[in-house]
Amino acid sequence: MMLDLLLRRRTALTTAVLFGVAAGLAIGQQSDPKPPPTGTRRDGGLFGNGTSQKKGAKEREEDANSRAVAGVIRNEADELVEGAVVQLKDTKSLKVRSYITKADGVYKFFGLSANADYEIRADAKGMTGDKRTLSIFDGRKQAVINLKLAPAKKDDKEVQEAAAK
C-alpha cells in the first residue's frame, strides 16, 4: 500500500526515496556481509588439519570404535630421523602396517581398533628403538607415542639378518 501511495504522488522526493529503498534491497540481496568460511584450517597437531565435517551415523559409530596413534622418531642426539621405518603390529590379527617418516620425523596410523593391542617399533640406518605397546586399556582416541632410536645391538642385527633371508 505504501508503495502504491508513493508511486501515485510521483514527486521528486518520493521517487528518490523509492529508488533508495529499492537500491538498498538489491544491495542486501546481492552481498552477504559475512561470507561463509571456505577452507578454514586450524592446527590439528600430529593428527591432521583439524577441519571438521558432518558425519553420518555409520561414520560416527565407526569413529566410536576406532583410534589413532602418532609420534615422533628421534635418535640419541635428540634429532628428528628421516627415513625411519615404523612398524605397527596388531597383536590380535598379526597384521603389520608400516610408515616411513619424512624430514619432520612424524609417523601416523589411523583407523585402529579399540579392541586390540598394538606393538610399535622403529628402525633406521642401523639404529633400532624399543618396542612399545598401545594397549586396549589405553582409552585415548589419539595416542601419542614418541620413539627414540639407539644403535642396534648384536642380537638385534642377527634377528634382522635372519628375517631378511
Image (cartoon, helix red, strand yellow):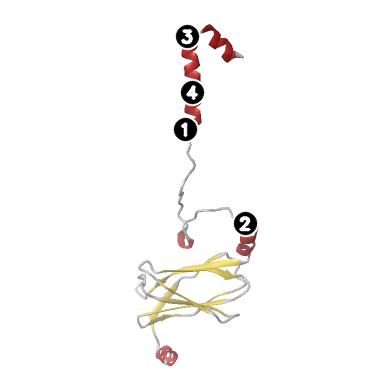
- Counting residues from the start of the chain, the first of labels 2 and 4 encountered is 4
Q: Nearer the viewer, residue 33 or 24?
A: 24
**Three-letter residue code for mark 2:** Gly
Q: What whole-number distance in Å separates the C-alpha atoms at marks 2 and 3?
A: 57 Å
Image point (62%, 59%), residue name: 60
Residue 78: percent from left, percent from top = 36, 71
For disc 3, the marked residue is 13
At label 4, the amino acid type is Gly
Above-or-below relation of 75 to 33? below
Mark 3, other Cα within 10 Å: few <14 / some 14–19 / many ≥20:
few
Asked if disc 1 and disc 2 are in contact, CB closer than 8 Å, the reply is: no
Q: Amino acid at mark 1?
A: Ser
Q: Which mark is residue 24?
A: 4
Residue at screen point 56% across, 82% down:
94
Tag 1 residue: 31
Residue 161 percent location from the top left of the image: 40, 91
